[in-house]
Amino acid sequence: MPAAAPARPGPRRRKRVRRPSPQRRIELILIGCLVLLSLVGGRLVQLQGLDRTAYAAMAQKQRLHTVALTAPRGPILDRDGQPLAETVDARDIYADPHKVVDAAAESGRLAPLLGVDAATLQTQMQQNTTFVYLSRAVTPQVSTQVIDLKLPGIGVLPATKRIYPAGPLASNVVGFANADGAGLAGLEYSFQKLLSGSNGERTFETGLSGSPIPDGHDILRPAVPGTGLKLTIQRDIQWKAQQAITAQVHALHADSGTVIVMDPSSGQLLALAVSPGFDPNDPSKSPISAFGDPAVSDVYEPGSVNKVITISAALQERLVTPNSPFTIPPTLRDAGFTFNDAEVHGTERLTLTGVLAKSSNIGTIEVARKLGAARLYHYLRAYGFGQPTGVGLPGDGTGLLPRLSNWTASTLPTASFGQGVGVTALQVASVYATIANGGVRVTPNLIAGTVDENGALKPAAAPEQHRVINASVAKQVRDMLEAVTTNDGTAPLARIPGYRIAGKTGTAQRPNSHGGYSGYTASFVGFAPADAPKLLVEVVLQNPRTGHFGGLVAAPVFHDVMSFALQTLKIPPTGTRPPVARLTW
Amino acid sequence: MTALAAGQPRTRPAEAPHRPSLRLVATRPLVAGRLPFVLLVGGILALGLIVLLLLHTMAAQDAFRLQTLERAAASLSDTRQQLALAEQQRQSPDALAAQARALGMVPTGSIAFVRLHRHHRIVGVVRAAAAPPPPPATASPAAHQRAQQPTQKNAHTAAGKPVHKVSPPHRRGSPPPHG
């Protein structure tokens, strides 16, 4: 440039020629070139220097592809490892309505494959959006057929599906999860966090065809699979219990029914059956009310099954013995109420065993008077009333046990034979399991442990336990309960030939929403073998219309379920003779 | 420099024949060695390029193959899941019970065990199971009883001798009243 400066006067001198000198022309061209070059250079600096990251990111974005990796939900297994809930691969079918060419024709072809109404599909395909699910979690076979149709605007996404291979089996316990992997009922709900795991993703560069570029950018954040649950439920016993209670609920036109099968020494629940249940594979067919588990959430008045608490407490406190004599009048007035027994009778002379075997309300009130409110309340609490069972199911109820300070004069006599207090079926089962287990209450439990993706079991923590009554008292009560299933007791129908069976019937009035009573709760809870209890079965029927005595309507179900469970678990009879019980004096 | 080196030896042999021909020998390979060296480098470059191309092609091919195989694996895994599911459904207690009923089997009404380790005794009560309910079409009471008769006989024969070896406290059809 400095060289060009002295040349400037030149053109001025030759102005009249009106022709720029070649030198001047070259200079102009040079300047023009330099300007152009600097523009290009500037642009280059702008692109490569200043905006570099943005453009590089844009370029990479064109090649980068992110795929969400769905974490498989953990399975729920029965005690033998049979699946009650598991996750399989599935596909979601979606439409991009903007790319759909002929909604009417396409929906017509898709409808039979997806099992959805063609009109519904067509409306979905005509929405003003770029994405709409047409059908979720269809089988891979269906999705292949959809892909083969090659319909414009219809796509397939990988998905997973929660399936329940055993159908309604234990659905009240297992619950169900929706298409987005959210547990909505049962253990699927209460163990959502554990079961769901966490999703991952893979980000990688792809070529035009969509296949990954080798050695390209590839970042993998693997999905963490959900942890599985192993339950203490035994599938076959659960099935039998569900079948038996469903049949009885239908036969008696009852509102609902519950069967609990439990191992008293470990507190493990082998079956927790309710009727009516629901099909977790298609929960939309059932009302929302069916999704709970009445065995832990339904509160009812237990009735005579409660007498065992009063009587075992009196035995433990050494106030009575199994042969203590009681004189039972036809009716008894206490706290302004008149109490009578289920059967009309004259004045009877019953032993304590007789009071329990014949389920005498009046006799139990006499025992309760010796015991007093404070001690009865203490034992009701010790047996687990008024607190959740801790079994791990949603809606685990506390029942309704009024605080001792709120007890009125009529609470002691009514609570002694199971009216005026509310319990759940599982709480009652736990009382009898305590007696069967020699007086030690083991918290009922349902979860045997967690299972990782390789199937390795991590056992659950041992359930809590505490002693409620002495082993000798528990044995006395067991012998007394055996008298219940004799011909003189209230439940001869519960007997299983060859086995010694102990149990107790319950026939309680059902409180209604108007503050009064209507209908009955019929129940039977028992264990076998009576002298070395291995299994406990409880049957509760709510509001049976034809017949309502626990010994007549619940005991046959007990018999069927207990027989099946004894066979399934191969529990032989003990071969001992039952003690000769004195019911009268 | 090459021209100089090539030119010098031609004039020198006349002047000093005793001079060693070391230079001549030394320079010739230099001239001749150029081409092979260029060829060698070029060859290595070309080979490298070809190998690189081949490797890339193979990698790309592998990527395609991987994709195809992954698809096949996914499809096979789908099939496996489908079959496993079908098997599980057939194994479910409900399906097994239905199958058993279809074969004419009935649940047992009594429970008995053979004790192998002591005296080979039978514990429990052995009793023939009740006949399965006849099809509803022929469900008259008389037909029901006639249908029941042979089944019970069969059951006794099947159970055989042990029926009479039932342990004494439990040897009867109906249990004694307890207490």
Image: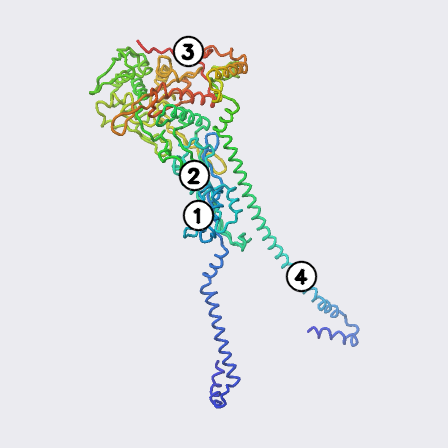
- Is there one chain holding both mark 3 and mark 1? no
Q: Tell me how far mark 4 sits from mark 1, CA to CA.
A: 65 Å
Task: Look at mark 2 in the image and give the residue it sits on.
Answer: A195
Using a 10 Å C-alpha cutoff, classify the residue at mark 4 as few (fewer than 14 neighbours), some (14 to 19) or many (20 or more). few
Residue in front for this viewpoint, A414 or A149: A149
Q: Amino acid at mark 2?
A: Leu
Q: Which residue is labeled 3 in the image? A: B176
Give the CA distance from mark 3 to mark 4.
105 Å
Q: How far apart are the two marked residues, 2 and 4, measured between alpha carbons?
A: 61 Å
Q: Which residue is mark 4?
A: B43
Frontmost of labels 2 and 1 is 1
- Judging depth in this view, the residue of A552 and A207 nearest the camera is A552
On the same chain, marks 3 and 4? The answer is yes
Report the residue marked by disc 1.
A122
Q: Chain of mark 4?
A: B
Q: Secondary structure at mark 1?
A: helix
Q: Residues within 10 Å of mark 2 (few under 14, many from 20)?
A: many
Label 3 close to label 4 by CB (< 8 Å): no
Q: Is residue A117 above or below residue A278?
A: below
Q: Nearer the viewer, mark 2 or mark 4?
A: 2
Picture quadrant of residue A320: top left
